Amino acid sequence: MKKSLRIMIVTLLCVMLIGGGGVPNVNIGNTLTCSKVTTVQAKTKVRKKFKKAMDKYYKFYKKYCKFMKKYNNGGNSISMLLDYQKLIEQQGKVNRAFQKWENKDLNVQELAYFNKINNKVIVLLSKL
């Protein structure tokens, strides 16, 4: 019974992944497209909205990696299915917040913060 339930859950997860509901869109080496990076004095700071979007992006991928580690270790299939559904919903919100910054002018500090957070995400994903 337990084995057949596990197979059913794993099959359902696979169908969701293949069906496009799937894996978060992560492009290793992802770069933010912006029309230009403004060169300004060191006084310029990272805008709060930008920092918030980047922090949510990182927080999401920490959750995603935690989920994948649990999945790889054979966690509880039923609760994992619910967790996966929540992750997919969060992915949409994170992606929309992140996409708002495409083609925006970033100052030097924002570009540096973007690179810092993106590198952290790449490290998290590389450990899966």
Image (cartoon, helix red, strand yellow):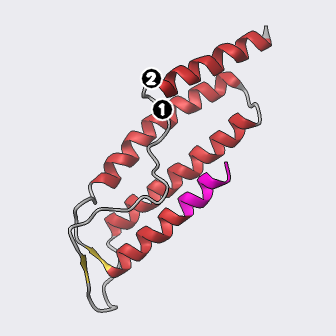
Mark 1 surroundings: few (<14), some (14-19) or many (≥20) residues within 10 A: some
* Amino acid marked by disc 2: Gly
State the residue at coordinates (54%, 58%). Answer: 121
Q: Nearer the viewer, residue 46 or 115?
A: 115
Q: Position of residue 74 (x, y in %)?
A: 76, 31
Q: Which residues are magenta?
A: 120-128
State the residue at coordinates (45%, 55%). Answer: 56
Residue topped by disc 1: 22
Q: Secondary structure at mark 1?
A: loop
Relative to 17, 104 lies left or right? left
State the residue at coordinates (57%, 23%). Answer: 14
Q: Position of residue 92 (x, y in %)?
A: 38, 40
Q: Quadrant of the N terminus?
A: top right
Q: CA distance from mark 2 to mark 1?
A: 7 Å
Relative to 5, 106 lies left or right? left
Query: In the image, is residue 122 part of the stretch drawn in magenta?
Result: yes
Question: Quadrant of the rendered structure where residue 50 is?
Answer: bottom left
**Height in image: 128 above or below 8?**
below
Q: Position of residue 11 (x, y in %)?
A: 61, 17
What mark, if any, has residue 55 been given in the picture?
none
* Amino acid marked by disc 1: Gly
Question: Quadrant of the rendered structure where residue 37 is?
Answer: bottom left
State the residue at coordinates (58%, 32%). Answer: 83
Q: Could you tell me if the residues under marks 2 and 1 are in contact, i.e. CB atoms within 8 Å?
A: yes
**Majority secondary structure of the magenta segment?**
helix
Q: Secondary structure at mark 2?
A: loop
Q: Position of residue 105 (x, y in %)?
A: 22, 71
Mark 2 surroundings: few (<14), some (14-19) or many (≥20) residues within 10 A: few
Residue topped by disc 2: 19
Query: In the image, is residue 50 part of the stretch drawn in magenta?
Result: no
